[in-house]
């Protein structure tokens, strides 16, 4: 007797048509997603393109103004790379978590104005209050996103509006009061940014880390909650992005021309988000490269330095919109060629017993000991294999016929 229970005869299939035991090897939520690992080749190829563009732009700058790449000018250039790099890291961290933080630009500008006003009290005295406020604001934003489970761009845009209200209270440029010169530590700032960008990319390229960071990325109904792990990682990413934006704003003020002009700060947001997308980070989250952020930030800063000898004034809005448009094309490339390679037609992926891992609660998932058709039969097995005619069975001769025509 067979039981109509698919869970005993075969692994349950998910909405993608792939057995859950297969998806458990790749995803923390076996009910969704594509089987297989993300392909990294598209990021490697694109990063070579970025490197070629950076080398070309640096050569053009050297040919036009060699002094821009030596001495104090080079140190100021390295600090500019670190400042924009911190904003780009903030955008990339929140973007890869699937909840982009659009408030990083206003936060950076607010931090720059604060440091310009309070810098004469000392670097530490000006930095610590800004750090505390940024951390608190980041946590508040994170709670709004993960508790209400709303899109990060919408919640952060609301937060950006609140910061802009504060910025609009300024009526004119603010002169930097302190005497802190970040160019004295330019090499340390640049190496620190480069190390965080590259090591973070390498770390996020690991399959468990990559899928953990991108768990907030929707795969079915965007309004469905993605679990406690996704909420925790996204909250940390939003809070960390806000702190990184604040540090970037301090470097922008300290390395500027002496004044910080008030504004909305959204131009810095567009430039940072566009740069990280140009680097190869997907606008949908999760996917990203290794060296792309470092190359893209250096390319943008060197381009701005290259326009100085010509006397050009490049708006951050124009530059940010350009790199953002190019980043949208890169996102399409990454999502098209970076997704798992589809299995050949008619080929079924092997099913292996695996552990779901600590990301989903730490339970060990094991397949059933044996399918239903292997269960022992409850009926006796006939030893004589010779065929028996049903109408010639002895019981038909020994038993009386209950429906005899003569008796009717």
Image (cartoon, helix red, strand yellow):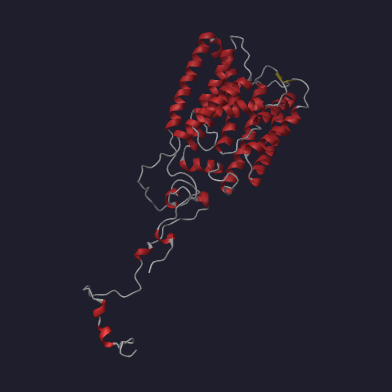
Q: Image check: 34 left or right of 384?
A: right
> How many numbered callouts?
0
Quadrant location, the C terminus: bottom left
Q: Residue furthest left?
A: 386
Q: Position of residue 307 (x, y in %)?
A: 58, 13
Q: Position of residue 300 (x, y in %)?
A: 56, 21
Can residue 70 be seen at all in this image of the molecule?
A: no
Q: Position of residue 287 (x, y in %)?
A: 50, 36
Quarter of the figure with residue 184: top right
Compared with 18, 59 (above or below) is above
Can residue 372 be seen at all in this image of the molecule?
A: yes
Q: Residue furthest bottom?
A: 407
Of residue 72 and residue 133, the one placed in the foreground of this image is 133
Of residue 68 and residue 304, the one placed in the foreground of this image is 304
Q: Image check: 88 left or right of 4?
A: right
Quarter of the figure with residue 163: top right
């Amino acid at each position: 007797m067979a039981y109509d229970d698919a869970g005993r005869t075969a692994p349950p299939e998910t909405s993608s048509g792939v057995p859950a035991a297969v998806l458990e090897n790749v995803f923390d939520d076996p009910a969704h997603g594509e089987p297989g690992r993300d392909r990294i080749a598209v990021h490697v190829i694109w990063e070579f393109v970025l490197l070629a563009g950076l080398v070309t732009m640096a050569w053009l700058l050297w040919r036009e103004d060699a002094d821009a790449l030596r001495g104090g000018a080079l140190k100021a250039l390295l600090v500019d790379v670190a400042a924009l790099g911190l904003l780009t890291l903030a955008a990339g961290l929140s973007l890869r978590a699937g909840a982009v933080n659009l408030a990083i630009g206003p936060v950076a500008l607010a931090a720059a104005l604060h440091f310009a006003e309070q810098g004469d009290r000392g670097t530490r005295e000006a930095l610590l209050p800004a750090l505390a406020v940024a951390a608190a604001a980041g946590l508040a934003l994170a709670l709004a996103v993960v508790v209400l489970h709303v899109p990060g761009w919408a919640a952060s845009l609301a937060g950006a509006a609140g910061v802009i209200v504060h910025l609009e209270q300024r009526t004119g440029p603010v002169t930097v009061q302190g005497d802190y010169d970040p160019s004295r530590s330019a090499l340390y700032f640049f190496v620190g940014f480069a190390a965080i960008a590259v090591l973070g990319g390498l770390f996020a390229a690991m399959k468990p880390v990559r899928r953990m960071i991108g768990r907030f990325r929707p795969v079915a109904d965007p309004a469905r909650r993605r679990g406690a792990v996704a909420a925790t990682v996204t909250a940390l990413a939003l809070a960390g992005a806000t702190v990184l934006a604040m540090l970037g704003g301090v470097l922008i003020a300290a390395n500027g021309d002496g004044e910080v002009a008030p504004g909305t700060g959204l131009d810095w947001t567009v430039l940072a988000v566009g740069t990280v997308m140009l680097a190869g980070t997907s606008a949908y989250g999760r996917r990203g490269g290794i060296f792309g952020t470092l190359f893209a930030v250096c390319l943008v800063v060197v381009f701005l330095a290259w326009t100085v000898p010509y006397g050009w004034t490049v708006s951050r809005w124009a530059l940010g919109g350009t790199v953002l448009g190019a980043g949208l094309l890169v996102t399409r490339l990454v999502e098209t060629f970076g997704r798992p390679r589809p299995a050949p037609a008619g080929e079924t992926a092997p099913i292996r017993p695996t552990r779901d891992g600590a990301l989903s609660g730490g339970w060990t998932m094991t397949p059933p000991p044996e399918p239903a058709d292997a269960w022992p039969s409850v009926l006796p097995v006939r030893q004589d294999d010779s065929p028996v005619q049903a109408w010639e069975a002895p019981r038909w001769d020994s038993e009386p016929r209950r429906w005899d025509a003569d008796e009717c």
